[in-house]
Image (cartoon, helix red, strand yellow):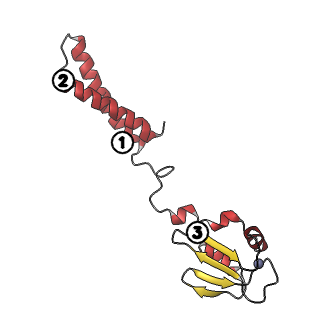
Amino acid sequence: MTQTERLIARLGKVRGRNGSWTAQCPAHEDKSPSLSVRETEDGRVLVHCFGGCDIQSVLGAVGMDMTDLFPDRPERYDGHTTKQVKPAFYASDLLRIASFECLVVMIAAYDMAKGKRLSNEDMERLKVAQQRIEEVVVYAGI
Ligand SMILES: [Zn+2]
């Protein structure tokens, strides 16, 4: 059940469809339906009483509050939110990447310890290793 349906279910003389309804305002003596309820495409509920009631009074009269005008997040997750969602990589993947990049760094360190000069290619690869380890830290949310 969407938030709009929850609200609609508590109102009297509901008329309308397709995201737009009129109903009796629960906050004042309403003989002719003067409450307008609309559902936006992203699942928010717009409520307006043409009798002049403020939104808190209307919602309060049916036991709801402002937070009920916004969609439930799990139901309406649109895939555009980047924070607090399932990570793109799992911890095991991240550790595997970090472990491999450490190996790259270790090999370079070993070569240097033996007095071998690092080639430009090696230096570039070390930069990549450093960037990847940094990315692992970001993905892990550390
Ligand atoms: Zn009203």
Q: Are marks 2 and 3 in contact (CB under 8 Å)?
A: no
Lower sequence index among marks 2 and 1: 1
Residue to which mark 2 is pinned: 120
Judge by depth and name the residue closer to the eye, 43 or 52.
52
Nearer the observer, disc 1 or disc 3? 3
- Percent of width and height locating residue 111: 21, 16
- Percent of width and height locating residue 76: 52, 65
Lower sequence index among marks 1 and 3: 3
* Marks 2/1: CA–CA distance: 29 Å
Q: In the shown orientation, is residue 44 left or right of residue 88?
A: right
Q: Residue at image x 20%, y 10%?
A: 115
Position above or below: 2 against 66: below
Q: Considering the image in quadrants, where does the N terminus appear?
A: bottom right
Q: Amino acid at mark 2?
A: Asn
Mark number for residue 93?
1
Of all residues shown, which one is farthest toward the top? 115
Judge by depth and name the residue closer to the eye, 48 or 99.
48
Q: Are marks 2 and 1 in contact (CB under 8 Å)?
A: no
Mark number for residue 44?
3
| Element class at badge 3 | loop
Locate ligand 1 by image quadrant.
Answer: bottom right
